[in-house]
Amino acid sequence: ETGVTQSPTHLIKTRGQQVTLRCSSQSGHNTVSWYQQALGQGPQFIFQYYREEENGRGNFPPRFSGLQFPNYSSELNVNALELDDSALYLCASSLTEDYEQYFGPGTRLTVT
Amino acid sequence: GENVEQHPSTLSVQEGDSAVIKCTYSDSASNYFPWYKQELGKGPQLIIDIRSNVGEKKDQRIAVTLNKTAKHFSLHITETQPEDSAVYFCAAKGSGAGSYQLTFGKGTKLSVIP
């Protein structure tokens, strides 16, 4: 059974640019949640997708958007990047919306 | 919204000793409390969890206790080993549509000294 995978591993972008991060959920899981983890902090919830629909959103501006595909993989898009967007972006998948969440290794985004 | 506080922020123990990390939560509707271990450069790994209808759960050297009345829960690691060194996060989750996100504490850096 394949775990949660994320790509790319690392990414460097310039302020104002746009970025797309990708996540493949664990086999059989239909729910994906995205979190942002700043250095030295706990992960903060961005949003959750359940069966291709957004199923809850944290306190992040609209320039953070996402998609979930029919195979339940997911994308996180961030527009108009700011320096404070530099963080580890984590994807977690779960069997369904109310089950245990299993995290991928994350994508380290640096905005310069 | 939910607020989770975690203490201590750093913890050093001798190999073989026990380690205890404590968390409090604010939302009495929260009903699921997982603990994650995060090693350097990796994503958080679920190590144990507890639901609000249970007071204690144990898995080998790791145990979690929950006090719903006081709204706090704790992670206990016995017979610590150097490979237990990592950052540990507690989290809380509610139930119902739109409430499935995990709210995390700020983490505890555990160092096990050989």
Image: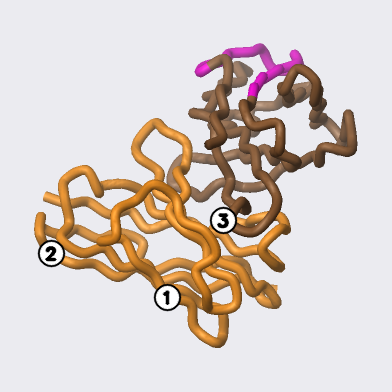
Chain colours: A orange, B brown
Residue A83 visible here: yes
Which tag is nearer the camera, tag 3 or tag 1?
1
Query: Magenta stretch?
Result: B9-24
Q: Residue at x 54, y 24 (%)?
A: B108
Quick one: label 3 or label 2, which is nearer the N terminus? 2
Crowding at dot 1, Cα within 10 Å, few <14 / some 14-19 / many 20+, comes out as: some
Crowding at dot 2, Cα within 10 Å, few <14 / some 14-19 / many 20+, comes out as: few
Residue type at tag 1: Leu
Give the percent coordinates (x, y) of residue A36. Answer: 40, 49
The numbered mark 2 sits on a residue in which chain?
A
Q: Is residue A34 magenta?
A: no
Q: Which residue carries the number 1 mark?
A: A67
Q: Which residue carries the number 2 mark?
A: A17
Residue A77 is marked as: none
Q: Residue at x 58, y 16 (%)?
A: B7
Q: Nearer the viewer, residue B103 or B87?
A: B103
Q: What SS does tag 1 mark?
A: strand
Q: Which residue carries the number 3 mark?
A: A103
Residue B48 visible here: no
| Picture quadrant where residue A75 is located | bottom left
Evaluate if marks 2 and 1 touch, with contact meaning CB atoms under 8 Å apart.
Answer: no
Quick one: label 3 or label 1, which is nearer the N terminus? 1
